[in-house]
C-alpha cells in the first residue's frame, strides 16, 4: 500500500519514512501541506495520507479539506492526522476537516501499526 507522509519536523519525517518502509509500505515523503497537496494532484492517490496538523504553508486540516473536495482522491484515501493537540474540540475539528483517524504525539510503533491496519481494512471494504 502507498502512504504519503506530510511532516515538517525532519526527524519525525525520517522516522515515519524509515519505519513504514521497513514495514513494507511504499512511502512518499513531503515536508509541508503544500508539497503534499501538489503530490496528491499529480499522482495516483495513495491509500493512506499521514498529515501533521501544524505545518508551514498549509496545515494538515487544510489538506484534509482539499482531499475531501476532490472526488478523484477523496473516496480512495484514508487520512490520519498526527498532532500534539489533545482537546476534544481540536480532535473534532480534525474530523470535520475530513480526517478518518488521528494519532496523538508522541506515539509508538504499535499504535501506528494498528492505525495503518485499520486504514487497510477500511480501504478494502
Image (tube, rainbow, N blue to C red):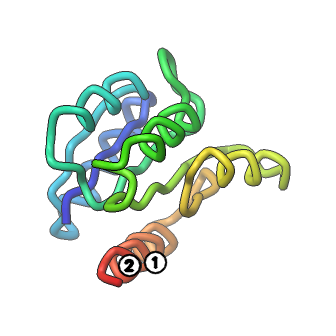
At which x and y percent is residue 23? 22, 69
* Residue 31 sits in quarter: top left
Label 2's element?
A: helix
Dot 2 and dot 1 residues touching (CB under 8 Å)? yes
**Vertical side of 76 occupied by 94: above or below:** above
Quadrant placement of the C terminus: bottom left
Quadrant placement of the N terminus: bottom left
User: Residue at position x 17%, y 33% from top?
Assistant: 42
**Vertical side of 104 occupied by 55: above or below:** above
At which x and y percent is residue 25? 19, 63
Q: Residues within 10 Å of mark 1 (few under 14, many from 20)?
A: few
At which x and y percent is residue 62? 55, 31
Front-most of 105 and 66? 66
Q: Is residue 120 left or right of residue 56?
A: left
Name the residue beneath numbered marker 1: 114
* Residue 120 sits in quarter: bottom left
- Tag of residue 56: none
Name the residue furthest top. 57
User: Residue at position x 46%, y 55% from top?
Assistant: 79
Q: Is residue 85 left or right of residue 102?
A: right
At which x and y percent is residue 21? 18, 58
**Vertical side of 31 occupied by 102: above or below:** below
Name the residue beneath numbered marker 2: 117
Label 1's element?
A: helix
* Residue 97 sits in quarter: top right
User: Residue at position x 37%, y 60% from top?
Assistant: 75
Amino acid at each position: 500500500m502507498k502512504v504519503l507522509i506530510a511532516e515538517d519536523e525532519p526527524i519525525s519525517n525520517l522516522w515515519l519514512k524509515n519505519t513504514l518502509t521497513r514495514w513494507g509500505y511504499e512511502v512518499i515523503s513531503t515536508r509541508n501541506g503544500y508539497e503534499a497537496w501538489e503530490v496528491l494532484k499529480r499522482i495516483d492517490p495513495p491509500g493512506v495520507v499521514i498529515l501533521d496538523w501544524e505545518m508551514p504553508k498549509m496545515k494538515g486540516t487544510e489538506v484534509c479539506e482539499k482531499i475531501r473536495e476532490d472526488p478523484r482522491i477523496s473516496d480512495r484515501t484514508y487520512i490520519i492526522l498526527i498532532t500534539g493537540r489533545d482537546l476534544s474540540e481540536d480532535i473534532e475539528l480534525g474530523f470535520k476537516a475530513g480526517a478518518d483517524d488521528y494519532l496523538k504525539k508522541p506515539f509508538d510503533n504499535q499504535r501506528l501499526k494498528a492505525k495503518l491496519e485499520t486504514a487497510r481494512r477500511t480501504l478494502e471494504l
